[in-house]
Amino acid sequence: MRLLLLAFGLALGFSPASAQSTPGSQPRMSPIVTWDPDPGVRPPTQRQLTPAELKAARSRAERVYDLLKAAPIFSQPAKHATLATAWPTVWDGAVREQLIVYWSAPQDVKQRPDGSLWPKTGGAHLLAWFEANKPPTPPMLEDPATRGNFTRGLVAEDPLQGMFAEPRTFGQIGGGTLYNSMLVFTKDGRSVLEPAPAGVLLEGEIERVKRLIAGMDRNAKSSLEQLEASMTPQAKAERRAKRADRWKTQFRNPTTLTGELDAADKSDESDYQRQKERFTAPAVRDPQSVSWGPRLALEALEKRLASLDAAGRQAGACGRMDPAFAVHNGVRFEPATSGGAGCVPMVRIRRGLVDLKRPAEIQLFTVWIVERPCGELWVGKPSLQSDNCDQVVPLFRQLDWAALRTVLGWQGQPAP
């Protein structure tokens, strides 16, 4: 779709009391950042912010908005209404600040009494999320070009968990690293990613395959039990009697009817043997077989883990495919130092990205383009699904990133 639906607005809802219609539908820019749009639609927070925290966050949002107003792609929109909404929260022990930049269909914004623009729920909007102290989750950084079958450990209870193939980087912008759909800045200048330990990956993979095998065995046992029950003398006699009752009008000759019933019994026996074979592991240990594939993969995983010393288990991992196996059983994790050519480095989100001893200090800053491949467009590769990138890539080129670092309180931390 050419314009991305306002996902955030759908979640927030819209309060008629907080905005009013503006005549006309010409491209225009909101004169000020939309702050605290409505008490009923604020993002969730684990505690109320202090007056000092609110004041600091509002000041930062207004200063970032001043930088946006200096960028022609935002301040001189040819087709859109441009605006930004902002509000801070406390989550996972740290103060997070969020500013959502909009390029909206002009008819899909309203003007509030203070003059700021507010997006209509369900309207057509292009979005870029500017967020402080909110660590990215693996799906935000996963790269379609390197994803493969290697993502492991994602759990709904902790979205920061999970290990995945190292995504491509497309350049440095103002000291931040541009991935395909996210620009990431860290105050300490270190990567937002860290190597995924080989031991952790192998241990997790062993447990995953064990659960898979256990589930297969339960299903096979249950199916075999049902199959055997269908071939007891009583079950066969009952099935033959039911067929005889159904077929007696079709086959009036008793000899013909008996022949048809015997043929059906013989077919049942053939089906039984075929099904039994399908639910029983074959004698040949074939890594391509449904039954043996996971078992042989487990043997390979356990053998590899046992071969690693403590240093090897702590070493960064890479992922490769074992061609002897079917794709869904062929993933192998190795220490990156011994993985060889074609072994894809594995990473995870760096632990402790935000130091909770300094919860109100901006330590991490990201610009997320909602899974659009802006990295490729940044380096000049045409994209048929650029959408937001048509606005965001020029903004990346026009924004004063040095001034942004000063707004974040990083003026004493030069861009690496």
Image: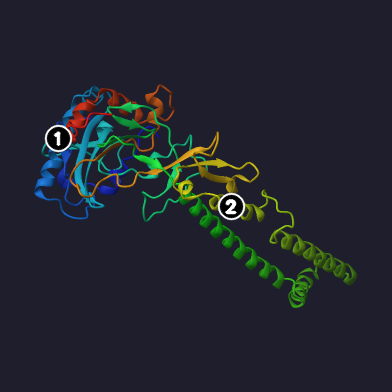
Q: Which residue is mark 2?
A: 303
* Location of residue 95 in the rendering, given as x and y in whole percent from the top left corner: 20, 47
In the displayed structure, 382 sits above or below 61; it is above
Choose between 54 and 391: the one closer to the eye.
54
| Side of 244 where 52 appears, left or right | left
Say which residue appears at 43% left-offset and 23% top-offset. 381
Which element type, helix, strand or loop, lies under badge 1? helix
Identify the mark nearer the N-term, 2 or 1. 1
Label 1 near label 2: C-beta < 8 Å?
Answer: no
Q: Is residue 30 visible?
A: no
* Location of residue 67 in the rendering, given as x and y in whole percent from the top left corner: 19, 28
| Side of 387 where 17 appears, left or right | left
| Side of 212 where 42 appears, left or right | left
Q: Is residue 235 visible?
A: yes
Task: Give the quarter of the image for residue 31.
Answer: top left
Picture mark count: 2
Task: Give the quarter of the image for residue 140.
Answer: top left
In the displayed structure, 192 sits above or below 396; it is below
**Looking at the image, what colour scheme do you see?**
rainbow
* Location of residue 377 in the rendering, given as x and y in whole percent from the top left corner: 39, 25
Q: Which mark is residue 62?
A: 1
